[in-house]
């Protein structure tokens, strides 16, 4: 049976879920996207709390890293003791782990690139023994990966899925170009009646799926070491925690979609 | 000396790119490339292309830069060995497995694709340790950032200098996957970044600008920064566009060839090349991130009105005794003011007078690839091109 991790959007959620989950995944403010984030001070407290309560704790640092950020990142990485792993995107982190002699595991979390067992096994040989699978592959592919690797596999089973990340400030650019004003916390970009959440913040622009993805009805069929439920952009995540034994309620309330769970992408159209 | 690296979607474009001044070309094979719907090269065509290039002391790189899924693992080793046997000079990769498999089973030189989004010193060092010989840097790099990597990591650097830009960090966009089911990381990108959308506020009210919301970026053009880029010690200048036309490739390659050669002669004025490059473009272009700027001037809000360039009229296929044999590529007619140019021919203007088809005088050349002859008062060569004169 897979362990359950959640990515909480508040310490209240952490408190509420303590008895039902095995661990937490928290983003570092200004250094992570696609996960709820906390300041480093808050994260250090969360780490302490998890250690005291025998819960696993993972921290996310998944931005594309520029040279000017390296020094700050080294400081942050050095302060993260007693965590079960760091979800990373930029390969700079691999070198920094060695340089700083960090004791915690790295979790390969390159979103749309964690898609096959050969590469996962090659990372395993480099010492990276946990991976967070892409949600762009089918459940069948995910299970095939688990059958062919020694790595520990984390699969997202609930949450908005990231579709796009850019350094550009695409909403700001549009507003500036046409002298428009908008103070929304987030926006939507709409095409043919489908609205996609889009956020323009200090880290650039990110775009998410129109609906929440759910594989909660497949928990018995997912061959993963960990299942991740991500609360990012979901204000009433408590409802999810209260209904984990009745996933139909969750899927119905949020009108979730299975996206690529059974549908494989194509790439040749002729 | 800086390498000029051009894209080539097929054998014709490979030959043209090299003849017009590229030092190397990059191509896609039938597998594992990020332009799955381009013409791409069979193994036999790769061999022919490599032979052609090597006869000119030039190079061929093959893109093997997709993100692998499980089912692509099976044929990978054999494919890499085939490329090695073809004599290709390097492969361009992003997936770690392809680097490792290539190192294990072949003698192929490895270049790291821009798809790996290398932006910093530590990442560059990681890949160097893996045996990567050259890194194609992420397109978000500023001048200062490139300079820092050059200073701190002993590895060859390649930068894009011209062509289309992604809106996202490379590898972090799967809009195509979700909106069209076409996998952006395996060569099926449907360019959602160029679509128009309505922008809504958090209450789902439309924010109405003069034009619809889009991610569409202007193209990149570094023609005015060639001196700085050469001074930085960048090993290779990469032109984007394996799906671009033979005319586009010839024009862009020739301009950058001249600009690079002139740099080494101490000539830095590129105003003429800028004008020519603007003529073949189908979108506005700008320097993008190099000068630290990514504001709205980098975006393109004119909608998908990019019109196919009709300037290219014909390809010279032979010249003898004052008569040029020309294969039509777009409609042209008697009286048109045209320009001939080629690898060894700077622009020569001419007004079309007598045009012959099968020995008969004609006024209009309207059929695709129609072959005609024209008497010219100056010498041209096979592979020179004819374009319309634009005032």
Image (spheres, coloured by chain):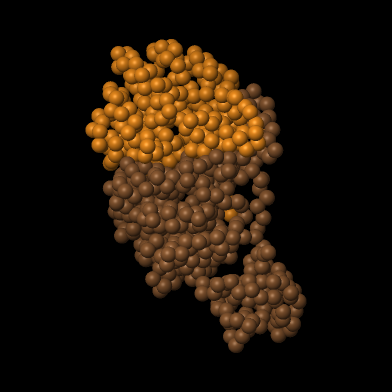
Chain colours: A orange, B brown
> Which residue is pictured at 37% across the width and 37% down the height?
A68
Tell which residue pokes out farthest to the right in this image.
B363
Task: Identify which residue, B374 or A217, lies in the foreground.
Answer: B374
Left or right of B172, for residue B390: right
Left or right of A128, for residue B311: right
Quarter in which the C terminus of chain B is drawn: bottom right
Residue A153 visible from this viewpoint: no
The vertical placement of B59 against B95, above or below, is below
Residue B283: image location, x then y, percent: 61, 52
Left or right of A223, for residue B152: left
Tell which residue pokes out farthest to the bottom in this image.
B321
Task: Identify which residue, B46 or B71, lies in the foreground.
Answer: B46
The vertical placement of B54 against B156, above or below, is below
> Which residue is pictured at 58% across the width and 54% down the height?
A270
> Which residue is pictured at 50% across the width and 34% down the height?
A204
Count all numbered tags in the image, as a single digit. 0
Residue A3 in which image quadrant: top left
The vertical placement of B103 against B89, above or below, is above
Quarter in which the N terminus of chain B is drawn: bottom left
Residue B154: image location, x then y, percent: 29, 51
Residue B69: image location, x then y, percent: 44, 44
> Which residue is pictured at 67% across the width and 30% down the height?
B207
Residue A64 visible from this viewpoint: yes
Residue B371: image location, x then y, percent: 66, 77
Task: Identify which residue, A199 or B348, lies in the foreground.
Answer: B348
């Amino acid at each position: 049976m897979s362990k359950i991790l959640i990515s909480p959007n508040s310490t209240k959620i952490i408190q509420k879920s303590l008895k039902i989950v095995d661990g937490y995944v928290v983003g570092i403010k200004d250094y992570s996207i696609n996960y709820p984030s906390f300041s480093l001070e808050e994260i250090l407290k969360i780490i302490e709390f998890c250690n005291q309560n025998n819960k696993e704790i993972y921290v996310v640092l998944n931005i594309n890293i520029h040279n000017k950020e390296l020094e700050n990142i080294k400081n942050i990485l050095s302060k993260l003791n007693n965590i079960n792993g760091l979800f990373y995107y930029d390969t700079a982190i691999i070198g920094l782990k060695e340089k700083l002699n960090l004791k915690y595991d790295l979790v390969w979390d390159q979103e749309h690139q964690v898609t096959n067992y050969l590469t996962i096994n090659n990372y395993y040989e480099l010492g990276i023994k946990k991976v967070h699978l892409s949600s762009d592959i089918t459940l069948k592919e995910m299970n095939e990966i688990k059958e062919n690797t020694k790595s520990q596999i984390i699969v997202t089973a609930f949450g908005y899925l990231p579709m796009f990340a850019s350094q550009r400030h695409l909403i700001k650019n549009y507003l500036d170009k046409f002298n428009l004003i908008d103070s929304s916390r987030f926006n939507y970009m709409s095409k043919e009646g489908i609205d996609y959440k889009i956020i323009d913040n200090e880290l650039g622009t990110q775009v998410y799926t129109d609906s929440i993805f759910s594989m909660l009805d497949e928990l018995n069929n997912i061959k993963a070491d960990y299942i991740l439920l991500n609360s990012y952009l979901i204000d009433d995540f408590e409802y999810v925690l209260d209904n984990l034994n009745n996933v139909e309620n969750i899927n119905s309330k949020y009108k979730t979609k299975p996206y690529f769970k059974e549908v494989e992408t194509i790439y040749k159209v002729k | 000396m800086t390498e000029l690296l051009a894209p080539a979607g097929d054998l014709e474009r490979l030959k043209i790119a090299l003849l017009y001044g590229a030092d190397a070309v990059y191509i896609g094979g039938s597998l594992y490339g990020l332009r799955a719907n381009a013409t791409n090269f069979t193994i036999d065509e790769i061999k022919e292309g490599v032979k052609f290039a090597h006869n000119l002391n030039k190079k061929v790189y093959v893109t093997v830069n997709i993100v692998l899924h499980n089912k692509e693992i099976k044929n990978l080793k054999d494919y890499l060995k085939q490329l090695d046997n073809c004599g290709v000079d390097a492969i361009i990769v992003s997936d770690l497995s392809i680097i490792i498999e290539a190192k294990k089973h072949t003698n192929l030189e490895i270049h790291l694709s821009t798809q790996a989004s290398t932006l910093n010193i530590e990442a560059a060092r990681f890949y160097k340790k893996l045996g990567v010989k050259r890194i194609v840097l992420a397109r978000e790099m500023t001048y200062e950032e490139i300079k820092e990597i050059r200073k701190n990591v002993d590895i060859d650097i390649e930068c894009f200098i011209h062509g289309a830009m992604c809106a996202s960090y490379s590898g972090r966009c799967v809009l195509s996957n979700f909106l069209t089911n076409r996998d952006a990381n395996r060569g099926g990108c449907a360019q959602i970044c160029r679509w128009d959308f309505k922008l809504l506020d958090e209450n789902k009210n439309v924010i109405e600008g003069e034009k619809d919301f889009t991610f569409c970026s202007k193209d990149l053009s570094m023609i005015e920064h060639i001196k700085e880029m050469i001074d930085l010690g960048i090993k290779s200048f990469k032109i984007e566009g394996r799906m671009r036309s033979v005319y586009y490739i010839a024009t862009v390659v020739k301009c950058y060839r001249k600009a690079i050669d002139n740099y080494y002669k101490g000539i830095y004025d590129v105003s003429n090349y800028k004008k020519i490059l603007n003529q073949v473009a189908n979108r506005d272009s700008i320097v993008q991130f190099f000068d630290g700027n990514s504001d709205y001037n980098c975006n393109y809000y004119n909608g998908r009105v990019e019109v196919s360039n009709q300037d290219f009229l014909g390809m010279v296929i032979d010249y003898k005794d004052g008569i040029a044999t020309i294969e039509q590529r777009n409609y042209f007619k008697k009286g048109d003011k045209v320009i001939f140019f080629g690898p060894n021919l700077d622009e020569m203007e001419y007004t079309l007078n007598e045009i012959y088809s099968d020995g008969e005088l004609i006024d209009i050349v309207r059929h695709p690839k129609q072959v005609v002859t024209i008497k010219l008062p100056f010498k041209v060569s096979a592979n020179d091109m004819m374009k319309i004169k634009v005032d």
